[in-house]
Amino acid sequence: MSHPGPKAADPTMARALRPLPFIIFGSRWLQLPLYMGLIVAQCVYVFLFLKELVHLVTHSFSFSEQQIMLVVLGLIDVVMISNLLIMVIVGGYETFVSRLRLEGHPDQPEWLSHVNASVLKIKLAMAIIGISSIHLLRTFIEAGNIGGTTRTTDYTETGVLLQTMIHVVFILSAIGIAWVDKMTVSPGKAH
């Protein structure tokens, strides 16, 4: 008489557990309103971009070169934040909710074909560094505009130093994320 091995499972037990995995797996759809909210935020950034662009065009003859540069940096900042939103919306949805099934579509982003949570983290870290760089450059320009009429914010030495340190922390964090990711996928590191 043969006894069932450890791999044999009671079919009633397997049927009883089916709703739980279904509910757990289905809970990923709770993220859908979050991604829809980010799409609304993307619309707000498009409106902000267009508003700033109209402001630049209508005042281009009265603005100094430095003022134009600051507005353009603001536009670049909006575009970079918008790119970050797209990466989170498309990459996050594809990674954590459901496939978009874009294979073969001519407009499929190149990075989407190999996106996973690890790649998404590194791309997001790089985007945050880019956004931080624009903010820091803007701060340096505005802080250097002492006595000018375009200066809207007072920058202290400590404030500029703190922004620089935060930027360096972002860079070190991105390097750390990339290093940990490289260590976890390195074939020579198996125990």
Image: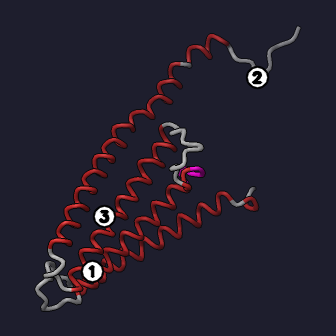
Q: Give me the C-alpha separation between circle 1 and circle 3.
A: 14 Å
The residue lying at 44 percent from left, 54 percent from top is 87
Q: Main secondary structure of the magenta part?
A: helix
The residue lying at 15 percent from left, 78 percent from top is 153
Question: Which residue is the site of mark 3?
Answer: 78
Question: Which residue is the site of mark 1?
Answer: 69
Whichever of callouts 1 and 3 sits on the residue coming sooner in the sequence is: 1
- Could you say which is closer to the camera, residue 148 or residue 158? 148
SS state under label 2 = loop
Q: Give me the C-alpha separation between circle 3 and circle 2.
A: 58 Å
Say whether residue 71 is left or right of residue 5: left
Q: Give me the C-alpha separation between circle 1 and circle 2.
A: 70 Å
> Is residue 78 depicted above or below 17 in this figure?
below
The residue lying at 39 percent from left, 34 percent from top is 30
Give the amino acid type for the residue marked by disc 3 in the picture: Val
Q: Quadrant of the N terminus?
A: top right
SS state under label 3 = helix
Question: Which residue is the site of mark 2?
Answer: 6
